[in-house]
Image (spheres, grey):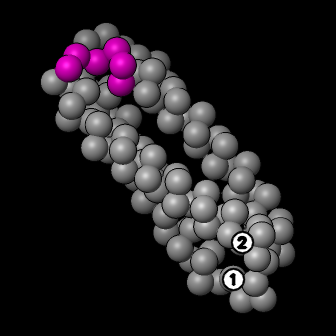
Amino acid sequence: MDVKDFCSGMSMELTAWKAKMYDAMRKVDKLGTAEREKILPNIEDIHIILAELEDKVNQLDKECPADWSGIKQEIDGGHVDMRSKYEETMDFIGAASPVSIPG
């Protein structure tokens, strides 16, 4: 896979994750204060991971190194971490919600 193709694909995927985070934040805003405080560290972690991934993708896009496998592995690992935190967060939101929140 070409680095430019990888970066383009990851950029699109990061945009989709940002949309998911926006939706998650809307749901978090509907929770009570105690529940919101429990989940905010996860939300912050996800935002940090998103920012780190975006920086790495931008770095690859600008520098286009001959050997980018190390950065790709970091991006793949960050993606797995972000997905895990997101799923954990959404599970908590669903359990903490006084009414069913779709999505």
Asked if residue 11 lies in the magenta stretch, the reply is no
Q: Nearer the viewer, residue 5 or 40?
A: 40
Please indicate whether residue 49 sits to the left or right of residue 73 in the image: left
Amino acid, disc 2: Leu
Q: Is residue 64 above or below residue 98?
A: below
Asked if residue 31 lies in the magenta stretch, the reply is yes
Q: Secondary structure at mark 1?
A: loop
Q: Quadrant of the N terminus?
A: bottom right
Quarter of image, res 89? top left
* Point 45% across, 21% down: residue: 26
Q: Which residues are magenta?
A: 28-33
Spot occupied by residue 61 in the image (x, y as percentages of width and height) = 77, 67
Q: Is residue 3 above or below residue 69?
A: above
Give the Cα distance between marks 1 and 2: 7 Å
Q: Closer to the observer: label 1 or label 2?
A: 2
Q: Is residue 36 above or below residue 9?
A: above
Q: Which residue is mark 2?
A: 60
Q: Is residue 13 above or below residue 94?
A: below
Spot occupied by residue 100 in the image (x, y as percentages of width and height) = 36, 14
Amino acid, disc 1: Trp
Q: Which residue is mark 1?
A: 68
State whether residue 51 appears in this view.
Answer: yes
Mark 1–mark 2 CB contact (< 8 Å): yes
Q: Nearer the viewer, residue 88 or 78?
A: 78
Quick one: which residue is furthest to the top in this view?
99
* Point 67% across, 49% down: residue: 13
State whether residue 1 appears in this view.
Answer: no
Quick one: which residue is furthest to the left in this view?
34
Sequence-earlier tag: 1 or 2: 2
Spot occupied by residue 58 in the image (x, y as percentages of width and height) = 69, 63
Q: Secondary structure at mark 2?
A: helix
